Image (spheres, rainbow, N blue to C red):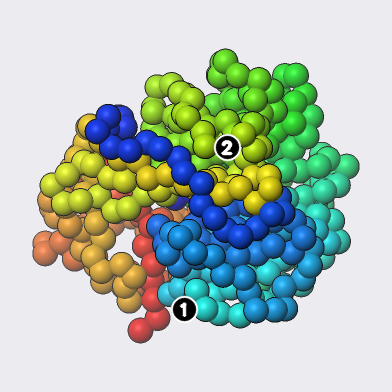
Amino acid sequence: MKKTLLTGIVFMTIVSAGFSQEWVIQNCGVNSVLNAVAFGNKNDGVIAGNNGVVKTTDNGGATWGQPAGGIPNVDYRAADVSHDTTHGNEVKFVAGSNGTIISQVGTTGVWQPHVTPTTEALNDIQIIGAIGFAVGGNGTILKTTSAGNSWLLLNVPAAAGIWLTKVSIDPNNPNFITIIGEGGFVLQSLNGGATWNQQSLPGGVYLGSVQYTAPDKGWVSGSEGQLYSFTGSVFTPYNTGTTNGIMGLGFVTENFGFGVGDNGYITQWNGTSWTPQTSPTTAWLNDVSVLTDDFMDNSTDYSVYAWAVGQDGVLISTVQNVVGMGNKHNESLVISPNPTSGKFRFTGMDRHNINLQVFDMSGRQLTDMNTSSDGLFDLGWLNPGLYTLKIRQGNSVNLQKLIIQAN
């Protein structure tokens, strides 16, 4: 994914003063404008840009490879990495001009084109499980319910003629979608895109990025330093103190993330405030991908990995150490095994008195159950796919993803 969120974890975060916070330039061998970057883990990622640029890495960006051929020569504007529950691999997607969407399974697969019902430019794409959206020019909104294999054009009159820039799906409830665009345009759905509610943010600025960071909560950014937090349909402005546009947002938790934008601008969210960081470039930055490694046992420390791309083939990256303070009990929660054919336990928490609710990727609740005497859960009756688990124990609530594989 572009941005990997640790959902259901509530804690404060700080960046360790003893750990490098430096952003550095990586050489990707590209001179064209880079519009998008997405990493599925700290090694495997993709960058995409104008003039048919699509490059991948399997070593965190130390080196980048160009596909051998068969890539349409269009301006690519969007990238995402999703998880293929059928094959157990990451799937890279890029999208761009002429309604182009292509994908690669794993790190060595051949890039495959997908048929789309539009010739409009596609500016963003996001897929979670089987559900995904792509948005673009002239109010174009595409939806997939087949993990990107096929796409349907949605008729949304409120978006007609609008240059749509970004889409974000709430990972805790994929029925919740927020789409943004030019002129402060905001479009939201609470039912998977069946109906939409539209509003315009004050000032009518160009909105460049949106991301959910917690259930029905997130951030929107745009030109002239505009930044808004939102809960549901209520948007609250944040004074960034800059006139630099913020065109890319990425978070690992509700309390830690980055924004990037004009003139190499970089800002960091620490849960209470946004703070500018030193940038190694003055090039305009268009997108950022942020993720984290797994929590260490008996530790609340973790590392954040981030990459940002922009003009003239600029690619920058950072690794920063974050110290978590708070509910360590929830932070170490692990589903084992995951993926599973159905049976699993939780580690990192007491196995007794657990209530479990299971939701499919459309947000539909499938079951409500309590732990067995030996702490074992069995969801083998579910179809293979990606599911959301809501885990309750006392006053503690945790959200986790579970992959069910075929026997």
In front: label 2 or label 1: 2
Instruction: Give residue 185's position: percent from left, percent from top.
Output: 75, 32
Is residue 214 in view from this perspective? no
Binning the other alpha carbons within 10 Å of mark 1 as few (below 14), some (14 to 19) or many (20 upward) gives: few
Type of amino acid under label 1: His
Q: Residue at x 57, y 37 (%)?
A: 281
User: 182 or 360, which is in the foreground?
Assistant: 182
Q: Secondary structure at mark 2?
A: loop
Q: Earlier in the sequence, mark 2 or mark 1?
A: 1
Residue beneath label 2, please? Answer: 281
Checking the image for residue 238, the label placed there is: none
Q: Residue at the right extreme?
A: 161
At label 2, the amino acid type is Thr
Q: Quick one: label 2, few (<14), some, or many (20+) residues within 10 Å?
A: some
Q: CA distance from mark 2 to mark 1?
A: 39 Å
Whole-percent x, y for residue 326 in the image: 22, 32
Total labels drawn: 2
- Position of residue 390 relative to residue 207, above or below, is below
Residue drawn where x is 54% and y is 65% of the image: 64
Q: Is residue 106 left or right of residue 327?
A: right
Provide residue 211's location: percent of width, then percent of height. 55, 40
Q: Give the secondary structure at mark 1.
A: loop
Decide if residue 272 is on the left or right side of residue 262: left
Q: Quadrant of the C terminus?
A: bottom left
Residue annotated with mark 1 = 87
Q: In the image, what residue occupies the spot 39% across and 67% down?
A: 403
Q: Position of residue 331 (x, y in %)?
A: 24, 45
Q: Is residue 28 positioned above or below 211 on the image? A: below
